Every structure is written in structure tokens, then in C-alpha cells.
Image: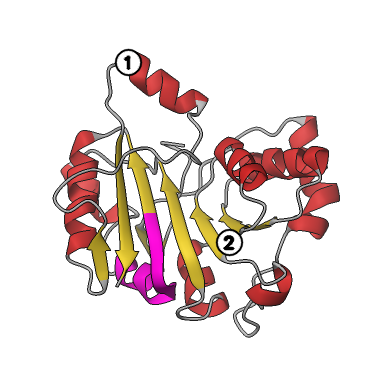
Amino acid sequence: MAGENESLTPAKGGIRSYVLRAGRMTDAQRHGLETLEPVYGLEFDAARPFELGSIFGGRPVVVEIGFGMGDATVEIAAARPDAGFLGIEVHAPGVGKLLSELGKRKLENVRTVRHDAVEVLEKSVAPGSLAGFHIFFPDPWPKKRHYKRRLVTRPFTDLLASRLAPGGYIHFVTDWAEYAEWARAQLEATPGLVNSHPGGWAPRPEWRPVTKFERKAGSAGRAIRELEFRKA
């Protein structure tokens, strides 16, 4: 979640969608990586785009960028077996945690890729092929000098729009009021995207669970703001 999810930052030769943070792994998380990443993980190869139709059995595919520890990912995937979910995350403990949960629940509609989201979307995902994006509680980068590191920033939002099929959606959630305003402005400025709730915020959809992080934010008095934009 905030502080763990991917965030846009300059990188040599281009941009990255994350800042990699060190973190300790539990034995269970390490075991998940070692034994289940070969089962649920996809390997990034710039020369070989993912064949999402065959990977997910023809299901519509939703990409989650920066799934943190994967708590929401698992609940959403379990509740929506008719959709496929591709989770992109570079934080190894979080990937290991999600993989362990996928193994316990025997979920077949989730795959992970441990790589930079910008490169994955540019090289591995075909234009117009996705049903949606989930971006939940990305790092808000509150200092003005760090705004360029925010994930929901053009031109990255143009890349997101290009990968959506007509009618596809972007669902964004944050507990940082200023970032919510920023994200809305960036998405409204992105050609081809339309706010499903013009000028306002989206309600929490029934399919999105309330996470432990979200409850802590509420207890701290931080309001949760959501956006839903669709590809025209």
C-alpha cells in the first residue's frame, strides 16, 4: 500500500514505475517465491509479449499495479472468478505473500510479474487488450519536488489508456487528498479517458474490499477518495 506500491521515478534510459525498497522476508514469503512463482509468475521478456488470452483462458484481464502484500488482490480475484488478474509488483516480500495465499486458496485466475510496470505494459501487453487497471493506495509522494515520481502522472496515464479496450476502466484509490485531486486532473487530461463520475469521486465498488491499511487511514482521519475513468 502507500509506501510500498510502485511510483513513477526517473531512471537511466527511461522511466520506472517504482522505487524499490528493502524489506525483510518471512520464511513463508520466501517459500512462496521459491515454490509458487514458477506456477503463478510470468517472466518478463521484452521480445515475447504475454499471450493474455491463453494465460487466463479467455477471461477479461485486469492489471493491478503495485499490489503491496496482495490482500485486496486475493479477495477480489476470489470474488470475481470470471476475470483474470495480472499483478505487477517489485517488492519481493509482497510477491511472496500473495503467492502463498494463491497457493492456499488454489486460485487459478491470478498471475504475477516481478518487474517494472512501465516496461511490462510497453513490451508485454498489447494495445487495447485489457479490461481494467487497479491502482490502490500508491505512494503519494507529498513533497512538491517529488510529484514527478507519482504513478498517476502523464505520460504514464497515456500508456494506461492505450492498453485498455473500449469501455475498460481505471480504478484509483488514495487516502491523500492532494494526490486525489492531482490524479483526477492527470486522468482528465489523458485523451480517450472519461470520468465515470464527472467532476467528482467514485463510490467504493462492492468488489473492492476494505483493507487493514484503509482502516488505519480512516482511524487517522484521512478520507478515502476513489476515481473511476473509462476508455471511450
Q: In this view, does 119 lie to the left or right of 205?
A: right
Residue at the image position 48 percent from the left and 29 percent from the top: 210
For the C terminus, the image quarter is bottom left
The alpha-carbon separation of the residues under discs 1 and 2 comes to 32 Å
Q: Residue 149 carries which label?
A: none
Q: Give the range drawn in magenta.
A: 156-170
Name which residue type carries label 2.
His
Residue identified by numbered label 2: 115
Residue identified by numbered label 1: 220
The label nearer to you, 1 versus 2, is 1
Give the structural element (helix, strand or loop) at label 1: loop
Which residue extends farthest left?
199
Q: Do the residues labelled 1 and 2 touch (CB within 8 Å)?
A: no
Residue at the image position 67 percent from the left and 72 percent from the top: 58
The mark nearer the N terminus, 1 or 2, is 2
Residue 180, given in percent of the width and then of the height, sits at 23, 43
Decide: few, some or many residues near mark 1? Use Cα within 10 Å; few <14, some 14-19, many ≥20: few
Name which residue type carries label 1.
Ala
Q: In this view, does 18 lie to the left or right of 81?
A: left
